[in-house]
Image: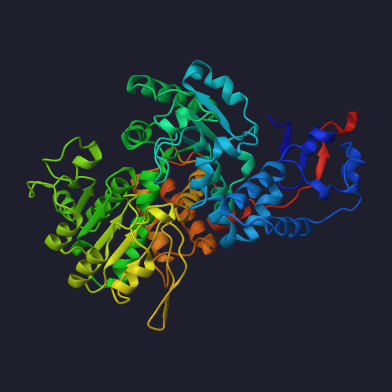
Amino acid sequence: MLRIHETDAFIETDITGKYLMTIPQLNKGTAFSREERKAFQLEGKLPFRIETLEEQVERAYYQFSYYDSDLQKHIYLNNLHDKNQVLFYKLVSDNLNEMVPLIYTPSIATAVQEYSHEYRQPRGLFISYENKDHIDKILDNRTNPYIDLIVVTDGEGVLGIGDQGIGSINIPIAKLMMYTLFAGISPLRTLPIYLDVGTNNEHLLQEKFYLGHRSKRLSQEQYDDFIDCFVKAIQRKFPMAFLHWEDFGRGNARKILEQYQHQCCTFNDDIQGTGAVALSAILSGIKKSGIPIKEQKIIIFGAGTAGIGIADQIYRSLIKYGLFENEAKEKIWLIDRDGLICDKSNNLTLGQKRYSRKDITQPVDLLNCIKLIHPNILIGCSAQGGAFTEEIIKTMAKFVEKPIIFPLSNPTHQAEQTPENIIHWTEGKALIATGSPFEPVSYNGKTFIIPQCNNALIFPGVGLGILTSRSSLLTDDMLFIAANVLSDHSENALLPQLADSKNSTLAIAKAIIEESMNKHLNRTELPKNESIESILKKHFWQPHYLPFKYKNMDKK
């Protein structure tokens, strides 16, 4: 672990010399002052000139601009993160629109797939099943000593590309970058973890460069035991931490969430985050459509982890708006690879069974389902690029004045349809949000800004609120509140632009804190003479260099 002590005014450490400059959390490069160079044995190890952070950012952007491909740019940014953490965050925060898609969706999918080929140095912790009896010791090998936030994956259900094994460590790394960039959570207090339980991806098992455990995934009994050992170790080591699960397979994701969400403060982004941000966009769309939420009919095309997560958020919101449980279920139609989910469908998960139709005797495809029910809302989570055909979109628009259409699958090529086509096919009437970023669309002299239904609009604010209040649990009510707050901050479009989401993130955090305190879930008391807003802003981590002090200066 790092031998440091960080305050708001300075960093105290006894690490010196070349080793100090190899630690990204501490390295300042050419910005070390004359006094720091002398005190930390850096004299002669750096060029003479002392630069400001802003000057370093200018050079870094110049270097970044050398590269042509998104993968090369992704690699450059991550190499910078491995060398100088503050410089990385300052560079990206100054260029959010350009760089977030490179370190997060959609470019992260390629980086995951190329991980073993492009491997340069490790980041985070790797815990395999063979180490299940030594998890505490592995956690002690972390770099950052104080941990508030953990993002963990087993890589079985990555984006729309499935089982990606060890390359999936890039996902927790990228998620934690979003927490820092948009919620100001200090990167010195975060930890990405990959649980290596094998992979069923035959390509990876045959790939000579593959760096993960070269074996099939564990049996269910072994897997459940391993997850339980992991959660108990986290509770022992970090009892106040927020545990974020990412990209687990459809069977395990919900099982893990339901088993542990009342035991510790935990969150599944694919289920809860995706559901909350989609609900927010739906609420914004409903306001524009003028049709009350209780009268909406919703088709969700793709009934995996994300699709069920969205269905659950809509279901709970319909109940909150006054429908009975059976009425709320009747508003939601799920379609999977074999057609509409009904009682005669085979091999349904527990999440799917809730929405199984009893009034349909056999599976129906998407087009015929649209003809049958005339939905107001169509959501795609299928990872089937182009699945929303011209006939499907035009058929839906025939029955609805302002159809709400969300092709949410990513990466970009797996989106169910492009916004440009949807806008043209509906003559500019559709209300659209997408999973991947798309350029604005021009139609009949009007420019349509395409909002991205990005989980990073929700989870950073939720995490900031949880960590500030030290809430013991993340509740369904908190996620409903977060979705409504985000919708209230969506003005012209269905959702804010990610680069402009700081205000909504802080508002979500404030609402989470208030709900935690109202339900007596908070494990810390906030100062009574200070507003929640000022507390959040004061603790919002910003990328800047702090002066260094030698820890044992009196002995030096």
Residue nearest the observer in this picture, 165 or 204: 204
Residue 301's x, y, as percent? 26, 52
Is 535 situated left or right of 291 in this image? right
Residue 403's x, y, as percent? 26, 68
Residue visible at 55% across and 30% down? 209
Tell me where residue 369 sits by quadrant: bottom left
Q: List the single residue furthest toward the bottom.
A: 445
Question: In the rendered image of this protein, does residue 73 appear above or below residue 261?
Answer: below
Residue nearest the observer in this picture, 526 or 175: 175
Residue visible at 44% across and 40% down? 246
Residue visible at 89% across and 53% down? 49
- In the rendered image, which quarter contains the N terminus? top right
Q: Is residue 190 visible?
A: no
Is 79 situated left or right of 397 in this image? right
Residue nearest the observer in this picture, 323 or 445: 445
Residue 249's x, y, as percent? 36, 36
Q: Total of numbered circles in the picture?
A: 0
Residue nearest the observer in this picture, 550 or 513: 550
Residue 54's x, y, as percent? 76, 59
Q: Is residue 144 visible?
A: yes
- In the rendered image, which quarter contains the C terminus? top right
Is 107 situated left or right of 376 in this image? right
